[in-house]
Amino acid sequence: MDTKRRLAKARIFATRLLAVLFFAFVAISSSRWEGSLVSGALFSAGALLVGVASVGRLWCNLYLAGHRNKDLVTVGPYSMCRNPLYFFSLIGAAGVGFATETLIVPAIILAAFAIYYPMVIRSEQQVLRSAHGEAFEAYVRSTPAFIPRPWLLREPEEWAVDPVRFRKKVLDAIWFIWLLGALEAVEALHEAGVIPVFLRLW
C-alpha cells in the first residue's frame, strides 16, 4: 500500500471515529433554544451548509474518480484551491454542528477541524511534491491552499471519469445529509423520552 492510500485510510478512520464520538455527545445533549425561532434558524442554516457541502464534495469527487492516485488534478474545483474537498468538508461539518441548534457544537467541530486537517493537508502535500515535483510546485505558486478563488476556475471541455469509483464516492460525498437525518432522529427520541438528556447547550 502506497503512502497516499495509507494517509487516506488513516484520515477516513479518524473522521469516522470523530463522528461516533460526536454522536455519543449529541445523543445525551439538547439545545437550550429548542422550539424557538433561534433553533429553527440554526437548523435551517445548518441544512443550507450541508446542501452546499454535499454538492461541492460530489463536484470534487467527479474530478478525482480515476485520477486521484496517478494524476495531479488542477482543474474544476482544484483550479480554485488545492484542497476543495476539505473546504467543502469544513462547510458540511459546520452545517451539521449548526443543525444541533446550538453554537457550542459547531465551535467544537471547527476547533477540531482546525487542529486536525492542517496536519493532513501538510502530509498530503509532501506526497504530492514527491510524486509530481515541479508541476506541483507550480500549482502551489498559482493556487491558494484552502480558500477558493472562484475567478480562477478552469474547466475542461471533457473529463474522463471512472464510473465505478465515482459511484463509490457518491455515498461518501453525501454522508453529511445522513448525519442531518440522524440528528432529527435523535431529537425525536429525546422528545419521546427514549433517550434522556443530560446536557443543555447554548
Image (cartoon, helix red, strand yellow):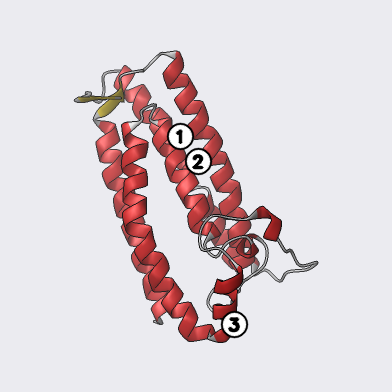
Residue drawn 31% across and 50% down?
112
Residue at mark 2 to residue at mark 3: CA–CA distance: 36 Å
Tell me the amino acid under the disc marked 3: Ala
Q: Earlier in the sequence, mark 3 or mark 1?
A: 3
Residue drawn 36% across and 30% down?
103
Residue drawn 31% across and 41% down?
108
Question: Which quadrant, please, contains the C terminus?
Answer: top left
> According to the image, label 3 marks what residue?
135
In the image, taking residue 164 as reference, residue 199 lies left or right, namely: left
Furthest residue in direction top, as rendered: 36
Q: Residue 28 occupies which quadrant of the picture?
A: top left
Residue at mark 1 to residue at mark 2: CA–CA distance: 7 Å
Tell me the amino acid under the disc marked 2: Ile
> According to the image, label 2 marks what residue?
177
Task: Look at the picture and state if 144 lies above or below 25.
Answer: below
Question: Which quadrant, please, contains the N terminus?
Answer: bottom left
For the residue labelled by badge 2, is the local secondary structure a helix, a strand or a loop?
helix
> According to the image, label 1 marks what residue?
181
Mark 1–mark 2 CB contact (< 8 Å): yes
Furthest residue in direction left, as rendered: 198
Residue drawn 41% across and 82% down?
2
Task: Look at the picture and state if 71 lies above or below 34.
Answer: below
In the image, taking residue 142 as reference, residue 182 lies left or right, namely: left
Give the camera-side residue of 112 and 100: 112
Mark 2–mark 3 CB contact (< 8 Å): no
Marks 2, 3: nearer the viewer? 3
Instruction: Locate residue 148, reporting x and y percent.
Output: 58, 55
Q: Residue 32 occupies which quadrant of the picture?
A: top left
Instruction: Locate residue 67, reporting x and y percent.
Output: 60, 74
Give the camera-side residue of 106 and 15: 106
Instruction: Locate residue 75, reporting x and y percent.
Output: 67, 67
For the residue labelled by badge 3, is the local secondary structure a helix, a strand or a loop?
helix
